[in-house]
Amino acid sequence: MIKLTQYNRRALYGGIISAIIMGLGAYFLGNISGYEAKVLIKSSLPGINTLCNTIALASATILALLLTLLSVSSRTESQLTKEHYTHVLLIAKIDTAIFILAIIFFQLLNIPITEADNVPSTWYTTIYYVSLALSSLLSGGLISVVLMLFNAVSSIIKIVGLGVTDHPLVFKDKKEDANDKLDLK
């Protein structure tokens, strides 16, 4: 089980709330018939394909940015705790999963289902709602990853750029802590 920090929980909650808000939009459309769903799928397909492409591109870019973040992290004068690298690893894992799901979803949407004659009309309603749900989840996941990346980058800026030494991600030597306690007496 992955231990989530306060920052990661906030980022994940942000993504979940975003996905729920986007999903509620589909819910408020109400019950639609198979024919209406088929028409809506045809009209929403280009937008969902663009969304999948954008999410895949953003995910790949974020993975590249994580390499830069690791490079900056390793060159700092302050030693960073394992927690920082655990954060970066978690971002990479979630981002990779979102990238894979976006590519799979993009490929599934490129099947010309609305052109097929042997698909029952009742399936279109299910396909429509599933496509909206998946696009909401992918969007919410990307929002979570961006928020987690923001937290990691802002921590590095505080440590490297601003020289904050009492940050929770800065490794403190136990000898220094013992000396600090002795000085307080």
Image (cartoon, rainbow, N blue to C red):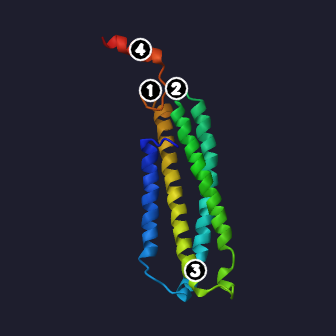
Q: Are marks 1 and 2 in contact (CB under 8 Å)?
A: yes
Q: Are marks 3 and 2 in contact (CB under 8 Å)?
A: no
User: Residue 74 vs residue 168: left or right?
Assistant: right
- Compared to residue 119, the image places residue 148 above or below, namely above
Q: Are marks 3 and 1 in contact (CB under 8 Å)?
A: no
**Which numbered disc covers residue 178?**
4
Q: Tell me how far mark 1 sits from mark 2, CA to CA.
A: 8 Å
The x and y percentages for residue 106 are 65, 68
* Mark 3 vs 2, N-terminal side: 3
| Crowd band around label 4 with a 10 angstrom C-alpha radius: few (<14), some (14–19), many (20+) | few
Query: Label 4 amino acid?
Result: Ala
* Mark 4 vs 1, N-terminal side: 1
Q: Tell me how far mark 4 sits from mark 2, CA to CA.
A: 19 Å
Query: Label 2 amino acid?
Result: Ser
Residue at left offset 55%, top offset 86%: 34
Q: Nearer the viewer, residue 6 or 149?
A: 6
Would residue 81 be seen by someone viewing this image from the given angle? Answer: yes
Q: Pointer 2: what residue?
A: 78
User: Residue 151 vs residue 59: left or right?
Assistant: left
Q: Tell me how far mark 3 sits from mark 2, CA to CA.
A: 53 Å
Residue at left offset 60%, top offset 82%: 42
* Mark 4 vs 3, N-terminal side: 3
Q: Pointer 1: what residue?
A: 165
Query: Label 3 amino acid?
Result: Ile
Q: Nearer the viewer, residue 13 or 145?
A: 13
**Which numbered disc covers residue 41?**
3
